[in-house]
Amino acid sequence: MTFLLFNVFVLSGQQTDYMKIRDEMKGISCTATDSSSVYNTILNLTAIDTTTITKNMELYYEDLGKCFWLLSKPYQENPELSQAIALMHKALYHKPSSTSIFWNLATFYNFYGDCAKSRFYMEQYKLYTKKKYWKEDYEKELQSRCSP
């Protein structure tokens, strides 16, 4: 595994696609419920030299942000949730029209207790997403957590 990562990072020069790195790395899971797997993924992701990534950088930040999200505690300020939000903003910088990033920001801000920003990013999500793909039930659930 170490040799493979060496090849991906060093031999590929300055043209690196994060998707290739992601595919080559085993154990990248930002959907696991096991906190040790999430911590392991964070360690693996933060060990990547991001200065060589020239393509799909938004996915790197989105993956890392989702991992911090999994470690966060909803409905209270905590460093993991703040980090997840900051990472999603970095992802958005790299792909300003990403519907998945808008969706994540709407969710993360809702759990952070910032309903105005949650609504803003939900509107951005809807602006860039065809109506047939809107997740209206989940949107209603998010909105129900905010005071009127």
Image: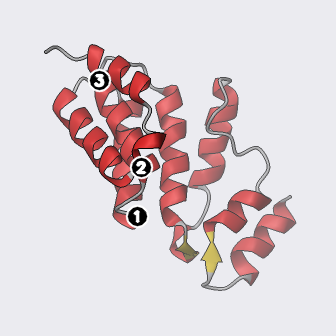
Q: Earlier in the sequence, mark 2 or mark 3?
A: 3
Q: Which residue is mark 3?
A: 77
Q: Are marks 2 and 3 in contact (CB under 8 Å)?
A: no
In what element is the residue under mark 3?
Answer: loop
Picture layout, residue 15 above or below residue 126: below
Query: Can the viewer see residue 145?
Result: no
Give the residue displayed 24% in from the left and 23% down from the top: 113
Give the residue displayed 75% in from the left and 82% down from the top: 11
In what element is the residue under mark 2?
Answer: loop
Query: Can the viewer see residue 132?
Result: yes
* Numbered tag placed on residue 95 in the rendering: 1
> Where in the figure is residue 102, as x and y percent of width and height?
36, 46
Quarter of image, res 98: bottom left
Q: Residues within 10 Å of mark 1 (few under 14, many from 20)?
A: some
Q: Earlier in the sequence, mark 1 or mark 2?
A: 1
Q: Kindly report the distance in space between the C-alpha atoms of the residues bearing marks 1 and 2.
A: 18 Å
> Where in the figure is residue 64, as x and y percent of width and height?
53, 47
* Numbered tag placed on residue 130 in the rendering: 2
Picture layout, residue 72 above or below residue 92: above
Q: Choose between 121 and 131: the one closer to the eye.
A: 131
Give the residue displayed 62% in from the left and 35% down from the top: 39
Picture layout, residue 106 above or below residue 19: above
> Where in the figure is residue 85, as x and y percent of width and height?
35, 41
Picture layout, residue 89 above or below residue 119: below
Q: Pick the quarter of the image with the C terminus.
A: top left
Q: Residues within 10 Å of mark 2 (few under 14, many from 20)?
A: few
Q: Kindly report the distance in space between the C-alpha atoms of the residues bearing marks 1 and 3.
A: 26 Å
